[in-house]
Amino acid sequence: MDKLILIDGNSIIYRAFFAMPPLTNTKGLHTNAVYGFTNMLLRLIEDYKPTHMMVAFDAGKITFRHEGYQEYKGGREKTPRELSEQFPLLKELLQGLGIAQYELSGYEADDIIGTIAKEADQAGRQVLVVSGDKDMFQLASEHVQIGLTRKGVTEIEIYAPEQIQERYGLEPHQIIDLKGLMGDASDNIPGIPGVGEKTALKLLHQYGSVEEVLANTHELKGKMKEKIETHADDAIMSKKLATIYREVQLDKSLDEMIFNGLVQETAGPALAKLEFKSLLERLSFSGEAGLEEGEVAQPALNVEVTVTDKENMDELIERLPNIKVLHVETYGDNPHRAEIIGVVFSSEDRHDYVPFDLLLTDQAAPILNWLQDPSIPKRGYDLHRMDLALHWHGIAFAGVIFDVQLAAYLLDPTESNQTVSALASKYGLDSIAIEEDVFGKGAKYKIPDVEILSNHLARKSATVLSIIPKQEKELDETKMKSLFHDLEMPLSRILADMEKQGIEVHMSDLQELGKEFEAQIHRLEEEIYSIADTKFNLNSPKQLGEILFVKLGLPVVKKTKTGFSTDAEVLEKLAPYHDIVQLILQYRTIAKLQSTYVEGLLKEISPKTGKVHTYYRQTVAATGRLSSQFPNLQNIPIRLEEGRKIRKVFVPSEPGWSILAADYSQVELRVLAHISQDKGLIEAFTHDMDIHTKTAMDVFGVKAEDVDSNMRRAAKAVNFGIVYGISDYGLSQNLNITRKEAAKFIEQYFEVFQGVQQYMVDIVKEAKENGYVTTLLERRRYLPEINASNFNLRSFAERTAMNTPIQGTAADIIKLAMIHMEQALSDKKLKSRMLLQVHDELVFEVPEDELEIMKSLVPEIMGKALPLDVPLKAEVSYGGNWYEAK
DNA sequence: GGTGTCACG
DNA sequence: ACGTACGTGACACCA
C-alpha cells in the first residue's frame, strides 16, 4: 500500500525557526530551523514509513492570489535573515537525504500539495499532509489526513475528517467558509470585521457556507447583520483567497517522489556539512530492527580485526614495524585510576586487538618494548590518557608524536564533542558507534563480548588512522602546524610527567585542619539554628532562602530561576539587617573549605604514593588554557587567610627540599600592551611601574602620591574589565557603581590609552571579517555569533573576541615557558621537578643544593619565554610548603 | 542531570 | 532597549 507524505516546506521551516533555540555552525551559519525540520522529518519517516515523500515550497513572492488582491500576505514581518539564509541549506540537505522537493512559479506550497493530494486521493492512495497551517484541513478526506505541528515541530497531531468534525463541527470543505468569515490576520485575509471563530462557527452551523450566510442576512439582526451586509464582498474574496487551488499543472510524477529510505552515501556528508552530529549518530544506529541486545549496527567500513591470543601473538610482533596507530581502551574518568581493557595496533590493512591481560604475559615482552621505545613514533587519540593509564600499570609509554584529540582541539577549541565518532562525522568518514551504545553508560557500563568489542575498537582505531592526514592538512592550512608539533605535543608529555610525579599532601596535617573546621562549622550551625529558632539544611539554598526571606522577612535582593538568590553578594547586602547573615557567610566559607579542600583532597590522595596526581586537561579551555581535575589544583584557596592555610599541606616529597613558586606579574596586561602597541601601556611596563596605580594616575589625572586606595581599586577593576572585554554594565556591577559612572571611567580610560581602544575596535572588526580570532602563536578560536542579530549573543562574541587573544597568548607564553623549563632542567641535569601550573604560576619542588640556581633560573626562563615589546616579569618565592612560597 | 554556589587565574 | 564581566572544576541539593 502506497503511503505519501507531503510537507509544506515553508510552513514547517517557519515553525521550526521559532520553536528552536538559536543554533549556528562553526561557519556562523544559522541552522536551527533546518535542524528542527530535519528532526521532524526523521520522526515522520520512523513513524509512518512512507513509500513516497515530497517537500513543497512557495515559489517567488507573487502568486496568482495577488492578481485579485494586492495586499495578500501583506503586513507580514519580513523574514528574518537568520531564517532566510536557511532555505538554501534545507534544500541542499533534502537533496542529500534523497527526499523530493518541488516548487512551481506562481504557486504556493499548499496549491502543489492540494493538487497532488487530490490525484492521490482519487487513486486511493494514503496521504499525510504535514503543515503548521490549519488551512490544510480543507484537504482532509477519506484517504487524506492532515498532520498539524504542535507547539514544537517534532510533535504532530493527526486530523482526519472525524477530528475536524469534532473540533469545529464542520466538514473539511467548510474550512474555507470559516476563513472567509473570520479572515486570517497572518495572511492578511480580511474576512468580516468583528467576526471571530465563535461567531463564524455559529453562522456556519446554521447556514453551511458563506454564500448561504449572505443569502440569509435578513434573518440576522443588529450590528452583526449590518457588518455582514457591508462586507459581503470581502467575505467572498476571503473565501477565494483561503481556497487551495487544486488544479495546478504539475510536471512532476509520483515516481519522482518514491522514497526508499535515506540515501546513506549522500545523507551522511549533507548532515556532516551542517554539523548535525547528534543526528548523524542517531541515524546510523537506530531504527534497525532485529539486533540482539548489546549489538550495535555498523555500517560498512572495511575493518578486519584479529583478536590476539597466545597462538597468533607472534604475527602481531612481526607486524609491529608497520603499526601506524595505537589505541589503548581505558575505563574510568580519572586516567590515573583507569582500568585498561585492551589495546589495538593498526596499520592500513590490518587491526590487531590484544586483551590487556595478555599484554602483561612474558610472551608479549616485545610488544611492551615497542610501546616503551621512544624512538618508535606513536599516533593515536588521547595519548595523554593512555600514557597515564599505562604508567600505573607499570608500562613506561614513550614516543608519541601525533595526538588526534589534541589536533581536533586546536582546529576547533570550542567543540565539546571531540569523540572519534564525532570526528568521523566531521570528516565524512563512515560513522562508528558512539561509546554509550557499545558499553552502556553509568551504572550500566559493561564490556561487551570480545567480538563486538574488538570490532568496535578496531573501527575506532581505523578511523583515527584516516583522520590523521586530514588533520595534518588542516593544521597546515590554518598555520597551526608549529603550535601543534612544537608546543602542544611536547607539552602533553611534560604534563603527563608532572601528573605522574604528583605533589605530596601532608595527610595528618590536613586531617587536623579538618578537625578545626569541623569545630567551627558545628559552632556556627548551633548559633544559626538558635537565631533562626529552627533547624534546617544550611546547605540548601532553597531552605536557607525560606528562612531569610519568608521567616525573617529580609528584603529580596536578587532572584534566581528557581527562587531567592542567597549568594555571597546578596548576603553582603543583607548583613546590616540581621546578625544571622554574617554567620551564614562564615559558615559558607568554612563549609566550602571543609567539603572541597579537606574532604575532597583527602579522597584524592593516592594510597600508593601519598600524593595527589591531578590530571591536566589540554583540550577543554576555549582560550588555550589548561584545566585541572581529580583534584583541581588550580583553585586552591589563597585570597582569604582561612583558606590559604590549605596550602600548608602541599609539601615537598623529599626531606630537605623546598617548594618554589614563580608567577608572572600582570602577564595579560603586558600581552595587551604588546598586541595593542599602546604607547602609555608599553611605557608603563618598560619602566616596571605599578600598573594599577599608573592607570589611576592617568584616568583620574592625579600625581602618583595622590592616588588613594579607592582610586587604585577602581583602576584595577577597569584593567580587569579591559582584559575581559569591557562593558559599562559589567564594570558597574563589579565596582558597585552606576552604569553611567562606569561608562565615564571607561571613556576616560580610552582617552588615555587610545592604542587599547583601537585594538578593541580592530579585533572585533577582524573577528567579524574572519569569523575567528588568533593568539600570537596562531591559536585560533571561532566566534560564529559575532555577526548575530541577537544583541546578547553578538555582545558576548565581541567580548570574547577582545579577551581570547589576550588570555590565549598568556596561555601560549606559559606553555612555552614550561617547555623551555623542562629542557633546562634536563640539560643542566637538575633534580628539581616541575609539579604544577596555575595559569600564570609554576610550582616546583627543589632540593636544597639547587635552590640558588632555581631562584634565578625559573624567572629567567619564564621571562624569556616569548619576546614581546614589553618585558615579561616573573616573581619567585619558596619555602617549606606551598603556603610559605608566597 | 540541572541548578546554585564558590574556589582559582 | 537589550542585560554579562573572561576562563575553569567541585560540591551540595533536589527533582
Image: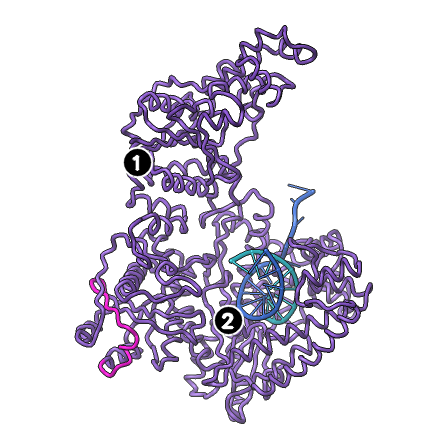
Chain colours: A purple, B cyan, C blue
Residue at horizontal 25%, vertical 64%? A451
Q: Position of residue A29 (x, y in %)?
A: 46, 44
Range of residues picked out in magenta = A347-363
Left or right: A303, with A40 as reference point: left
Considering every residue shown, the one lying at the far right of the view is A577
Please tell me whether residue A350 belongs to the stretch shown in magenta.
yes
Q: Which mark is residue A629?
A: 2
Seen in the picture, residue A131 relative to A714 is either above or below; the reply is above
Residue at horizontal 30%, vertical 31%? A2
Q: Choose between A712 and A649: the one closer to the eye.
A: A649
Q: Position of residue A701 (x, y in %)?
A: 76, 61
Q: Nearer the viewer, mark 2 or mark 1?
A: 1
Q: Which residue is mark 1?
A: A259
Left or right: A425, with A567 as reference point: left
Classed neighbour count for the residue bearing mark 2: other residues with Cα under 10 Å, few (<14), some (14–19), many (≥20): some
Q: Position of residue A392 (x, y in %)?
A: 39, 80
- Which image quadrant is residue A53 in? top left
User: How many numbered marks, from 0 up?
Assistant: 2
* Mark 1 residue type: Phe
Q: Quadrant of the C terminus of chain A?
A: bottom right
- Which image quadrant is residue A745 in? bottom right
* Mark 2 residue type: Gln
Label 1 residue SS = loop
Label 2 residue SS = strand
